[in-house]
Amino acid sequence: MTRVRIDLFASLDGYTAAPDPAVDNPMGEDWGPLTAAYAATRTFRQKVFGDTTGAGTTGTDDAFAVAFFEGVGAEIMGAAMFGLHANPDDENWKGWWGDEPPFGCPVYVLTHSVPRPAIEMAGGTTFHFRSGAIDDVLAEASVAADGLDVRVGGGIRTAREFLRAGLVDELHVTIAPIVLGRGNRVWDDLRGLEHTHNVTTVVAESGTIHVTFTR
Amino acid sequence: MTRVRIDLFASLDGYTAAPDPAVDNPMGEDWGPLTAAYAATRTFRQKVFGDTTGAGTTGTDDAFAVAFFEGVGAEIMGAAMFGLHANPDDENWKGWWGDEPPFGCPVYVLTHSVPRPAIEMAGGTTFHFRSGAIDDVLAEASVAADGLDVRVGGGIRTAREFLRAGLVDELHVTIAPIVLGRGNRVWDDLRGLEHTHNVTTVVAESGTIHVTFTR
């Protein structure tokens, strides 16, 4: 059965890094400390950097990284996460995920603009642009996922929109033991999420806290 | 050596319960869910309710509860935590901690008003009222602690004032795996606390997260 999943990163004070409009540092300077434990895992190094040396951590953080990459058949993301706002007038701009984006499945980009034609990338990723209601896009993505899961990839406003609408079956938040004091708020408008979902918490060897809400 | 300690409760989204001005529910309605795991410990039941049956949890939450009650020789709290604002014109009002408050040591109440005379309570607690600078009050409390620790008991604004001033050696935050979405913010103005203190994280059997900053 297709499930809708979200993975987020948060600091102890409930912030995620605010993206930087500069294309060369799209995730902002707080993204590094926030995701350091994840970036150190063997799985991340393999999947994102193509590192086949086996280097990287192999504990609890890595187990979550493995789960992150498993079983996703379609992805949904906001326009900003694709990079649509960075070059709004360049029809040939293919986002900042590189020539071979790390999705390997259909990716539905939510936009309020007139949707562009689909862009087929190397590695099995095709970007589709949709301006409809989120449940309509989710229905289309669910069909495309063909029995696998749909991930709502972000950014944070898109993720919270799906959470508020009650469309999410599993929310995994990686909490770095740091205080950012600034950024985009992860948890706003989600009071009582523990009543609609079961919560589990675990601490990795790195000190990183993994919180999972499942229904 | 006297150390300065703070214990706080927070939700995943970084809130603590906002106190309610009504005297019959001073901690507000979110305080119960926020502190449920702590209130369930054997130590809390013994120390606060006088429950000598041995009932209550005995795991990680209880180990932190034991540590909470150990080695404190003096306490500092804000006027609101004492209850000074609840009955500002009643010179006989002894706060809302009951006839035998659970401190058993000198308690320094910070106030911007003209300090009242000290109030001696049953069980070894004496309330002193001070309107000076927080480092002066801390110096006095440190002497009174006589080699034991000084706890900054709260409320949250008082705690953050001591943290911002760099006066705190150990901050223990009990994070309940719930989303409150409202209340007083625990972590504001504390960006980078992980650079001045070492951080440890542990999850209790209850799913409660304990984060400790130590220097």
Image: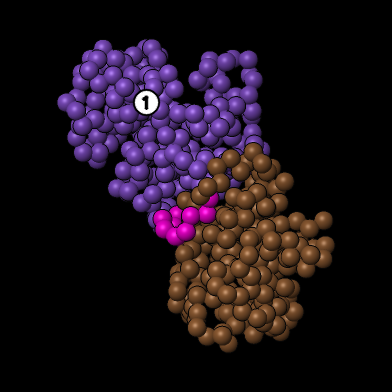
Chain colours: A purple, B brown
B21 relative to A136 in the view: left or right: right
The amino acid pointed to by label 1 is Pro
> Are there few (<14), some (14-19), or many (20+) residues within 10 Å of tag 1?
some
Chain letter of disc 1 in the image: A
Residue bearing mark 1: A21
Q: Residue at x 67, y 76 (%)?
A: B127
A133 lies left or right of A154? left
Residue at the extreme left:
A114
Which residue is at a point 24% across and 15% down the rendered structure image?
A: A90
Magenta region, residue range: B179-187
Is residue A71 or residue B115 the one in the foreground?
Answer: B115
Q: Is residue B42 visible?
A: no
- SS category of the residue bearing label 1: loop
Q: Position of residue A133 (x, y in %)?
A: 21, 38
Q: Quadrant of residue B119?
A: bottom right
Please state the horizontal and vertical placement of residue B131, each as a whole percent of the image: 61, 68
In the image, residue B119 above or below residue A84? below
Residue A189 image point, x, y percent: 36, 51
